[in-house]
Image: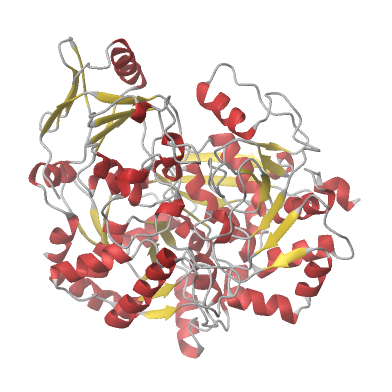
């Protein structure tokens, strides 16, 4: 997993609530046996018509190069497919900002170096307004200080993250290395539980 | 000291270690896997050069991606075939028991776990599928995980998890005739929204829940994820024990007695405190139907659709469904009826549908698919003659799999068509690009097939 420290980028606004992981990556594109290439089908049915032509109005067809996705509350609900996090990351997103995230999506994102930043409803509306006023508006995310700011304006908000997960992201470590280091304790637990 | 909730008892018994200021190392008793969310996790093991830690606690099936016709023939779709082939190879290489196509135990992962007796009270169970919450019906902590977490369990039989908060939802009183488990859970979701349970593990309780069969309890727990909850659970009781007795992997003889003594300790103590409690009255619940593009957009069949009040997400959903705010949903014409999925494809569901359609014919405008949850359900339906009743009514009985619930295989609802579905999600395009899903109980789906439109099953019964 790649480390995450600070990011300054433009943002793609998707001001819809309850965006489910079936929209992020429809089930018919889950047939691969590797993690690569899911970005091509990110938001497939919102990005493209059935005949494969682009839907001009969809945000990803208008905004290019943004590493931050701004989304309405309850982002990532529904299916546990980690392919949703892979697709967002593969497309180029490194941060998703919302006022509320579904649990499994949040875990999946953190396990792939994609940072879910949960802000207040009020700050989310400020972000949407700032990006609507100027699509080139930069947003800064500072993981060490747990802060999200609208660059060039006096607007910032802190965000919460589990201390362990923060450590993992800052250092590019994953949970499996950590768990493998606990093998002795796990085997001891098994002997006790089975006794 | 306050007593413990059912959740606390099981969780605490499975914590190997707690990370300071962080998650807990939770031991997993049973790991269920399928073809779609496991290949990248197997690849991860091989990249690290480590074996699967506890293959005997891992059970595999092929369900998400499989055809529901001619399962004895090679799979046509090359991508689906390569994913199912990868599962076969990975299970063989790592010593995992696989109930694949052609095996008499094959079926939807959340149907076969309980029917084989793999799912038992007091266990921790995970699977790379959000509807793993189904198994909570037996008094387990069961929840869906992502593929990186599948790899954690492969590597160490443990998972790093932050302890969720606890919620109890009680439904008290008697259900009206024609109202069932599916209506209960669709009603709860409509009341508290698709994020109302986020951050919580839910225990369902109350007399209406206790009166449900195991199949009904599984339907309720199955859709806990549609509340946003990590999982749902119901304390085991005599109904649970009667269901389990004699199942292939259920304990036998002395082991049964030993387990029963433990299982009977699995309840929430009188003085236990939940982080949140919500109560509903069973009498308020009528047959439910969804009209929008998330499972909380549901109403009683006799009710009009709500008005948007300027909410753009709501307006987008109605536009997708081509419904008008405030319109009645009753008598809405539909095109397809799908009976299946890990929510409602068990023998009790098939019996209920067969009883309602017996001696009748589906409407001319309806295509009706019935996809059993497992080979065992399919065989039992045939033994009971349900297949003939369904065929005479014009239903097509297919072979087991997830099918049109998520339309990964060729079972897709065409763009623009309406489908009354016993599955769990009505998201845009869930049943195929452009498809429009109305979630309902097997009874409501069955009567829609007969009349060709949304019908109140209570009137149909009289």
Residue at 41% across / 52% down in the picture? A29
Q: Is residue A131 left or right of residue B198?
A: left
Q: In which quarter of the view is residue B41 placed?
A: bottom left
Provide residue A160's location: percent of width, then percent of height.
Answer: 23, 32
Q: In which quarter of the view is residue B132 placed?
A: bottom left
Q: Is residue B150 left or right of residue B334?
A: left
Of residues A127 and B132, the one drawn nearer to the viewer in this rendering = A127
Q: Is residue A139 left or right of residue B377?
A: left
Of residues A178 and A131, the one drawn nearer to the viewer in this rendering = A131
Of residues B156 and B329, the one drawn nearer to the viewer in this rendering = B329
Residue at 78% across / 67% down in the picture? B390
Provide residue B378's location: percent of width, then percent of height.
Answer: 65, 75
Q: Is residue B294 visible?
A: yes
Residue at the left extreme, as displayed? A171
Provide residue A165's location: percent of width, then percent of height.
Answer: 18, 45
Q: Is residue B207 visible?
A: no
Provide residue A157's location: percent of width, then percent of height.
Answer: 22, 20
Of residues B333 and B146, the one drawn nearer to the viewer in this rendering = B333
Q: Is residue B391 above or below residue B271?
A: below
Q: In which quarter of the view is residue B142 placed?
A: bottom left
């Amino acid at each position: 997993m790649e480390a995450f420290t600070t990011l300054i980028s433009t943002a793609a606004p998707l001001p819809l609530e309850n965006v489910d992981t079936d929209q992020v990556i429809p089930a018919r594109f889950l047939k691969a046996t590797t993690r690569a290439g899911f970005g091509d089908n990110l938001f497939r049915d919102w990005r493209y018509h059935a005949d494969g032509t682009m839907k001009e109005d969809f945000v990803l067809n208008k905004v290019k190069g943004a590493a931050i996705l701004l989304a309405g509350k309850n982002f990532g609900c529904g299916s546990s497919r980690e392919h949703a996090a892979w697709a967002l990351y593969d497309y180029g997103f490194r941060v998703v900002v919302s006022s509320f995230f579904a649990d499994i999506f949040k875990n999946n994102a953190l396990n792939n170096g994609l940072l879910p930043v949960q802000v207040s409803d009020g700050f989310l509306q400020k972000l949407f307004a700032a990006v609507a006023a100027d699509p080139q508006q930069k947003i800064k995310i500072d993981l060490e200080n747990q802060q999200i700011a609208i660059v060039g304006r006096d607007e910032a908000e802190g965000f919460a993250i589990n201390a362990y997960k923060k450590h993992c992201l800052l250092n590019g470590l994953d949970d499996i290395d950590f768990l493998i280091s606990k093998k002795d304790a796990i085997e001891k637990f098994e002997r006790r539980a089975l006794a | 000291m306050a007593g413990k909730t059912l959740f606390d008892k099981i969780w605490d018994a499975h914590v190997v270690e707690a990370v300071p200021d962080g998650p807990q190392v939770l031991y997993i008793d049973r790991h269920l896997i399928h073809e779609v969310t496991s290949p990248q996790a197997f690849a991860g093991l091989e990249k690290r050069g480590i074996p699967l830690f506890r293959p005997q606690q891992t059970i595999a099936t092929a369900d998400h991606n499989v055809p529901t016709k001619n399962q004895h023939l090679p799979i046509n779709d090359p991508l689906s075939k390569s994913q199912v082939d990868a599962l076969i190879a990975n299970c063989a290489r790592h010593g995992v028991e696989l109930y694949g196509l052609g095996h008499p135990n094959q079926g939807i992962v959340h149907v076969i776990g309980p029917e084989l007796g793999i799912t038992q009270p007091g266990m921790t169970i995970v699977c790379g599928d959000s509807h793993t919450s189904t198994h909570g019906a037996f008094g387990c902590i069961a929840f869906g995980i992502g593929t990186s977490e599948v790899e954690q369990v492969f590597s160490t039989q443990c998972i790093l998890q932050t302890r969720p908060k606890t919620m109890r939802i009680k439904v008290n009183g008697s259900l009206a005739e024609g109202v069932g488990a599916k209506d209960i859970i669709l009603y709860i979701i409509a009341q508290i929204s698709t994020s109302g349970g986020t951050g919580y593990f839910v225990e369902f309780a109350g007399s209406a829940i206790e009166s449900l069969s195991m199949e009904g309890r599984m339907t309720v727990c199955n859709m806990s994820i549609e509340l946003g909850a990590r999982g749902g659970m119901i304390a085991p009781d005599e109904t649970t024990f009667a269901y389990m007795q004699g199942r292939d992997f259920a304990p036998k003889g002395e082991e049964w007695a030993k387990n029963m003594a433990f299982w009977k300790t699995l309840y929430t103590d009188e003085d236990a405190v939940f982080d949140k409690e919500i109560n509903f009255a069973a009498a308020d619940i009528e047959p439910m139907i969804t009209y929008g593009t998330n499972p909380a957009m549901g109403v009683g069949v006799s009710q009009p659709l709500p008005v948007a009040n300027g909410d753009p997400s709501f307006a987008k959903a109605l536009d997708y469904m081509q419904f008008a705010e405030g319109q009645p949903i009753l008598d809405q014409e539909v095109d397809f009826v799908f009976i299946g999925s890990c929510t409602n494809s068990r023998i009790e569901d098939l019996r209920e549908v067969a009883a309602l359609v017996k001696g009748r014919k589906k409407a001319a405008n309806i295509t009706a698919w019935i996809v059993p949850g497992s080979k065992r359900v399919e065989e039992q339906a045939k033994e009971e003659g349900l297949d003939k009743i369904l065929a005479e009514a014009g239903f097509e009985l297919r072979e087991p799999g997830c099918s049109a619930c998520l339309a990964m295989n060729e079972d897709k609802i065409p763009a623009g068509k309406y489908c009354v579905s016993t599955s769990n999600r009505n998201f845009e395009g869930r049943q195929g690009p452009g498809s429009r899903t109305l979630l309902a109980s097997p009874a409501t789906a069955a009567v829609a097939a007969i009349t060709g439109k949304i019908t109140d099953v209570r009137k149909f019964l009289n």
